[in-house]
Amino acid sequence: MARFLLLHGAVNTYTETKVTGTQPQEDTPPRTAYPPCPILIVDDEAEVLFAFATELRLAGLTNLRTFDDPRDVVPALGRHGAAVVLLDLAMPHLRGEALLARIVAEHPDVPVIVISAADDARTAAACMKGGACDYLCKPLEHGRLVRSVEQALARRTDGHGHDRLPIGEEEYHA
């Protein structure tokens, strides 16, 4: 049996996993990814990508894609879409603020959660005005990442897991 201890800013969880060479039984139902569209995690630090992905997987959010190069995000959104984007601000090649503006302009129905080490009210306000649905400061308090993602998913779906109409195209109920 292998034991893994994850101790990084966002993850303070002890996970015990059995490592065996056996395959799942045939009567085991297939695992489905949740949410149906992936959650994109964008950060240039591999440790942060690993920690955030691990925390989300432990919470049952398993459809994840990580990006250490922000230039790859917009093409991936065009090909696969996204349920939520988790976005760092300080990255090489393309600043997070510029990527936020592109995502909001080209994919306005995709919620973006900015996660930054910059604990600055002006930066947070600028990101929220720029279209972010939440602004989180690193290091994150335990559970804060999952709560924010779940809130973004709840705002995006109708309660039955189906995407709502894009912003500005709400259904009329008589």
Image (cartoon, helix red, strand yellow):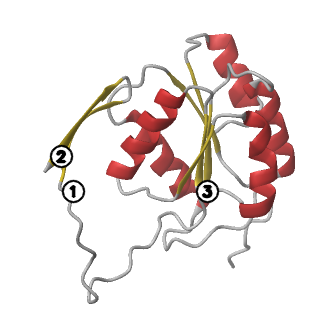
- The three-letter amino acid code for the residue at tag 1 is Val
Q: Which of marks 3 and 2 is in front?
A: 2
The answer to whether residue 108 shows anywhere in this view is no
Secondary structure under tag 3 reads loop
**Quadrant in the rendering for residue 173:** bottom right
Badge 1 or badge 2: first in the primary sequence: 2
Q: Where is residue 72 in the image (x, y as percent from the top left)?
A: 76, 43
Asked if 69 appears above or below 105 in the picture, the reply is: above
Q: Of the residues shown, which amino acid type is indicated by label 3?
A: Ala
For the residues labelled 1 and 2, say whether their Cβ atoms are less than 8 Å apart: yes
- In terms of image quadrants, where is residue 41? top right
Q: Which residue shows up at 78% across the image and 62% down it?
A: 79
Q: Element at badge 1?
A: loop
Mark 1 or mark 3: whose residue is earlier in sequence: 1
Q: Kindly identify the amino acid type of the residue bearing the numbered disc 2.
A: Ala
Q: Where is residue 75 in the image (x, y as percent from the top left)?
A: 81, 51
Marks 3 and 2 close (CB-CB < 8 Å): no
> Which mark is on residue 19?
1
Q: In this view, does 86 lie to the left or right of 48?
A: right
| Location of residue 164 with respect to 142 vertically, above or below | below
- Name the residue at 77% across, 26% down: 97
The label nearer to you, 1 versus 3, is: 1
Q: How far apart are marks 1 and 2 (CA)?
A: 6 Å
Q: Residue 2 carries which label?
A: 2
Question: Residue at left 80%, top 46%?
Answer: 74
User: Which residue in the structure is indicated by mark 3?
Assistant: 83
Identify the element where label 2 is drawn: strand
Q: How many marks?
A: 3
Q: How crowded is mark 1: few (under 14 residues within 10 Å), some or many (20 or more)?
A: few
Image-based side of 156 in relation to 48, left or right: right
- In 3D space, how far apart are the residues under numbered discs 1 and 3 (Cα atoms)? 31 Å
